[in-house]
Amino acid sequence: MKELRRVPTGLNDASIKVAEEVLEEVFGGTAKELVFALLKKKHDLKKDDTTRKPEIFQETLEDVLGDSGKVIESMIIQRISFKNIELKGGVRHG
């Protein structure tokens, strides 16, 4: 199995926040809470630990949302990438 790099804590927090934002924007708070409740129940994985095991988060999205889970995952990755560019000063507004 491929070993994943440990993500710095600040990026963990930002990634989790982005995942929550995307899930809530697209499906509402109930679906967001369902995804995180299933992560805890099925995999004993707390919300704060999802970036440590992204493959489990991806699997849970697909279990809950079917093929839409892949679209949501893509949206999360795009938003994280965009926020990362903003933090590095690569995007200027105004």
Image (cartoon, helix red, strand yellow):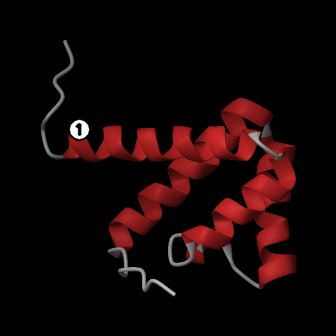
Q: In the image, residue 56 lies at what x, y percent?
A: 67, 72
Q: Nearer the viewer, residue 76 or 86?
A: 76
Check the picture and name the quadrant holding the C terminus.
Answer: top left
How many numbered badges does the structure rendering display? 1
Q: Quadrant of residue 55?
A: bottom right
Is residue 92 depicted above or below 48 in this figure? Answer: above
Q: Residue at x 58, y 73 (%)?
A: 48
Seen in the image, is 28 located left or right of residue 51?
A: right
Residue 86 percent across, percent down from the top left = 23, 38
Residue identified by numbered label 1: 86
Q: Where residue 47 sits: x, y (%)? A: 65, 70
User: In the visual, does 22 lie left or right of 44?
Assistant: left
Which quadrant holds residue 5? Answer: bottom left
Q: Residue at x 34, y 67 (%)?
A: 10
Residue furthest toward the front? 1
Residue 85 pos. (x, y %): 23, 41
Does residue 29 sit above or below 38 in this rendering? above
Instruction: Give the SS element for disc 1.
Output: helix
> Mark 1: which amino acid?
Glu
Q: Residue furthest top?
A: 94
Residue found at x 67% / y 32% = 25
Question: Which residue appears farthest toward the left when viewing the image?
Answer: 89
Q: Is the residue 67 above or below the residue 17 in the image? A: above
Q: Residues within 10 Å of mark 1 (few under 14, many from 20)?
A: few
**Identity of the residue drawn at 77% across and 71% down:** 39
